[in-house]
Amino acid sequence: MLYRVRTGIPWRDLPERFGAWNTVARRFRRWALAGVWEKLFQAVQEPDYEWVLVDSTTVKAHKAAAGQKKVRRQPSV
């Protein structure tokens, strides 16, 4: 179902590996009427920031990230 939405192809052009196009289309319609897609959409709208927490004890920045200027070596004569 996501393949069809992503590619925008008609139901009849679904690859055979997904099964009969009519079966997939009917399942999509049943899920739409049952509110499955709406629930799924709502579930992915609210990110869980508890798992994204980053602090300085786990991240080390490169020297250049702090604004340190590049050291240019003088050519040897």
Image: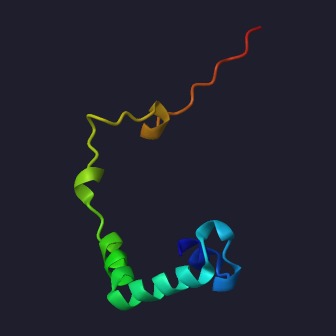
Residue found 33% across the figure and 86% down from its top: 35
Residue found 40% across the figure and 83% down from its top: 31
Residue 59: give x, y in percent of width and height.
Answer: 34, 36
Residue 20: give x, y in percent of width and height.
Answer: 61, 77
Q: Is residue 31 visible?
A: yes
- The reply, left or right, for residue 32 in relation to residue 51 is right
* Residue nearest the observer in this picture, 60 or 49: 49
Residue found 70% across the figure and 80% down from its top: 13
Residue 7 occupies quadrant: bottom right
* Residue nearest the observer in this picture, 71 or 30: 30
Residue 22: give x, y in percent of width and height.
Answer: 59, 85
* Residue nearest the observer in this picture, 43 or 47: 43
Compared to residue 36, the image places residue 72 above or below, namely above
Residue lying furthest left in this view? 50
Residue 14: give x, y in percent of width and height.
Answer: 66, 76
Residue lying furthest top in this view? 77
Residue 75 occupies quadrant: top right
* Residue nearest the observer in this picture, 48 or 13: 13
